[in-house]
Amino acid sequence: MIVSLLRTIRPQVGERWHADEVWVKINGNIKYLFAMVGGEMRFVLARKVADSKNRHNARSLLKEVR
């Protein structure tokens, strides 16, 4: 019940967002963590873990935020 309510809440974020990526080693394999946060509140808008760092993964993160 609470989870379904939390999924309906949309935070107020500004027009400026920040994106970042970092690599992490998981079980000996390199993975890339992509994240998009709101500019002022630093609210995490989207995150994604991927096997490679490429344009497709970055664009899919942006589409998730929109």
Image (cartoon, helix red, strand yellow):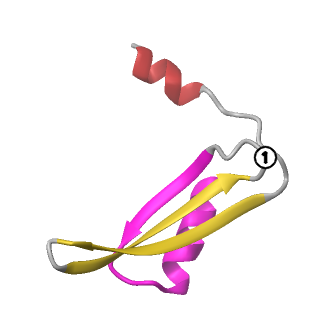
Q: Is residue 26 visible?
A: yes
The residue at 76%/35% (across/down) is 12
Q: How many numbered discs sit on the rendered protein?
A: 1
Q: Residue at x 52, y 72 (%)?
A: 21
| x then y, percent, for residue 10 | 66, 32
Task: Using the rendered image of the protein, determine whether residue 66 is visible from the camera's viewpoint.
Answer: no
Looking at the image, residue 51 sits to the left or right of residue 57; the answer is left
Residue 19: x and y in percent read: 64, 66
Q: Is residue 13 left or right of residue 57?
A: right
Q: State the residue at coordinates (16%, 79%).
A: 28
Residue 59 highlighted magenta (yes or no): yes
Residue occupied by mark 1: 40
- When the figure is inspected, residue 61 is found, relative to residue 10, above or below; the finding is below
Residue in front for this viewpoint, 56 or 21: 21
Image quarter in which the N terminus is found: top left
Mark 1 secondary-structure assignment: loop
In terms of image quadrants, where is residue 52? bottom left
Q: Which residues are magenta?
A: 44-65
From what the image shows, is residue 21 above or below residue 9?
A: below
